[in-house]
Image (cartoon, rainbow, N blue to C red):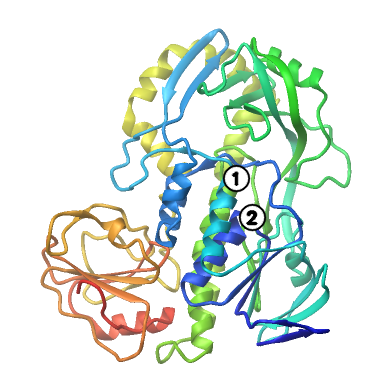
């Protein structure tokens, strides 16, 4: 569809993405990769703002891999971070590289600034001909029953457009959420985060990250400052006040207060320069819905967490990859490119069913972790200031149990998230035993497709649906329709079964023997049709 605004002409788009943070950029990439015409608008005129997120989890790297951006991300990341954990007078050193995670290509935590993630994703979009329109603000958005109507304001004036879908990736104070009339269930934390970029004396630049445990909360020093050598992150009791902009940097913090925070936890570092600082008020919250008609919410517009376990950016990107392919297939279906019997509403409804449940579980995790990390209550304060130093000698032993650490990372990074109750998770007839269940994440492993062993996730590192046939499985039904489906026969996997893998790496369908009707029904459900390609 085309929108007129004075003498300006806007090219047709399928998906209007509001917000150019990691969530919006990831969504635009995923939707574009699956056939949608996308437009990304961002009200901020400049791309840089101090990063709040500093960690990429293994699962996030997995879901971004088919979009061809992981190599560029890893070039900017520290994938072998060392950490010095200071518990009172005791110091415990550990590394977070090469964790015992054999079923992923990224068995490590990656320290990486949010601004670097945005740079990589923005360049990837530009390579695909999609330019982020900065300085363009969404004024209103509404669902008109058959599409989304939006009013935008930029330096060129006011523009009215209509497109099939609009997605709010516009943060905690989401305009899209407000325009959709979607309620918000949440509450503020009594603690806040203090952020600062510092040059420090007594601590060498490029050293390991440092974590200090004190009675008033944890303090982190990361060698990832954007305007100075170090990024400080501390949790402290909130000063309160009305009208707080949750999740956004607030007023600066005096240098004397920052120095006092360092001294309180036993650091000998001296502040030589404060490049930037801010207080960030926090809340935990969840949108009552993730969709209203043709308006959708993703990332911070849909859910808000404490910074504990580093969920915000990762959760937003995982939302984006889940929703992006569905919007792409739905947009293609509107143009007549979907399989017979395709019902876009089922596909689009599955986004909320899958990701809102995941967000609720993540909220419980982060709330518990933040209580231990930041609460100034008597018990958590005693645990950090008294119990933790006494238990310090046992920490290396616990960290030495690589499988125990790996299981914790597996939970934190959302590798265990499943969509077993999704309408897109279908068990064929007969069921396939010994394979991931429909809705589960597909683990990585060594496979053969007729030659030397290769890693499965590497073979699937391209957009679209993937059909994995066991060695003796019957070929899938063939139709003349063009489709985003790749077929691979795993010659080192005996049996007659088949697994269909969604574009976000979750199993959608499986069967233990030929089930043409079941497979065709599932492909119709997600809007794809079979057209074997690649190494069938």
Image quadrant occupied by the N terminus: bottom right
Tag 1's secondary structure? helix
Residue 160: percent from the left, percent from the top?
Answer: 78, 80
Task: Residue under label 2, please give it.
Answer: 21
Tag 2's secondary structure? loop
Q: Is residue 304 visible?
A: yes
Density class for disc 1 (Cα within 10 Å; few <14, some 14-19, many ≥20) is many
The residue lying toward the viewer, choosing from 30 and 347, is 30
Q: Are marks 2 and 1 in contact (CB under 8 Å)?
A: yes
The residue lying toward the viewer, choosing from 353 and 37, is 37
Tell me where residue 310 sits by quadrant. Answer: top right
Mark nearer the N terminus (2 vs 1)? 2
Q: Residue at x 55, y 49 (%)?
A: 117
Task: Residue under label 1, please give it.
Answer: 114
- The answer to whether residue 336 is above or below residue 396 is below
Image quadrant occupied by the C terminus: bottom left
Left or right of 289? Residue 85 is left
The residue lying toward the viewer, choosing from 389 and 65, is 65
Density class for disc 2 (Cα within 10 Å; few <14, some 14-19, many ≥20) is many
């Amino acid at each position: 569809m085309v929108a007129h605004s004075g003498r300006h002409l806007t090219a047709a788009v399928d998906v209007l993405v509001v917000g150019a943070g990691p969530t919006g950029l990831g969504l635009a990439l995923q939707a574009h990769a699956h056939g949608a015409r996308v437009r990304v608008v961002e009200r901020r005129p400049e791309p840089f703002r101090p990063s709040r997120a500093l960690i990429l989890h293994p699962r996030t790297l997995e879901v971004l891999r088919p979009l061809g951006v992981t190599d560029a991300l890893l070039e900017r990341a520290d994938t072998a971070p060392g950490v010095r954990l200071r518990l009172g007078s005791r110091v415990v050193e550990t590394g977070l590289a090469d964790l015992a995670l054999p079923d992923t290509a990224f068995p490590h935590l990656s320290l990486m600034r949010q601004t670097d993630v945005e740079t990589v994703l923005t360049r990837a979009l530009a390579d695909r001909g999609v330019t982020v329109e900065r300085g363009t603000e969404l004024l209103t958005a509404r669902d008109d029953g058959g599409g989304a109507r939006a009013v935008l304001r930029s330096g060129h004036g006011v523009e009215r457009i209509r497109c099939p879908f609009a997605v709010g990736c516009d943060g905690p104070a989401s305009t899209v959420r407000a325009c959709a009339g979607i309620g918000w269930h949440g509450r503020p934390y009594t603690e806040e985060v203090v952020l600062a970029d510092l040059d420090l004396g007594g601590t060498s630049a490029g050293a390991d990250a440092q974590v200090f445990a004190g009675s008033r909360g944890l303090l982190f020093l990361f060698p990832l400052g954007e305007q100075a050598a170090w990024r400080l992150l501390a949790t402290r009791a909130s000063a309160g006040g009305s009208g707080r902009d949750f999740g956004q940097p607030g007023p600066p913090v005096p240098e004397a207060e920052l120095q006092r925070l360092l001294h309180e936890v036993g650091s000998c570092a001296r502040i030589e320069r404060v490049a930037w600082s801010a207080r960030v008020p926090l809340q935990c919250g969840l949108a009552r819905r993730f969709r209203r008609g043709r308006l959708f919410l993703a990332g911070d517009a849909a859910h808000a967490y404490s910074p504990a376990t580093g969920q915000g950016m990762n959760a937003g990107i995982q939302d984006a990859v889940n929703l992006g392919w569905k919007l792409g297939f739905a947009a293609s279906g509107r143009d007549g490119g979907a399989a017979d019997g395709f019902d876009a509403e089922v596909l689009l409804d599955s986004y909320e069913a899958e990701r809102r449940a995941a967000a609720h579980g993540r909220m419980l995790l982060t709330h518990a972790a933040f209580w231990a990390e930041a609460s100034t209550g008597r018990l958590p304060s005693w645990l950090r200031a008294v119990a933790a130093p006494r238990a310090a000698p046992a920490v290396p032993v616990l960290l030495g149990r690589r499988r125990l650490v790996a299981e914790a990372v597996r939970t934190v990074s959302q590798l265990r998230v499943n969509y077993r109750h999704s309408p897109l998770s279908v068990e064929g007839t007969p069921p396939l035993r010994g394979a991931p269940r429909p809705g589960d994440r597909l683990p990585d492993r060594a496979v053969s497709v007729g030659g030397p062993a290769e890693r499965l996730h590497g073979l699937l590192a391209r957009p679209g649906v993937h059909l994995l046939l066991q060695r003796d499985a019957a070929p899938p039904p063939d139709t003349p329709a063009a489709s985003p489906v790749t077929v691979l026969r795993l010659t080192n996997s005996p049996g007659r079964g088949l697994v269909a893998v969604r574009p976000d790496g979750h199993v959608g369908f499986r069967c233990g023997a030929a089930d043409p009707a079941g497979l065709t029904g599932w492909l119709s459900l997600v809007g794809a049709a079979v057209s074997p390609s690649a190494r069938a």
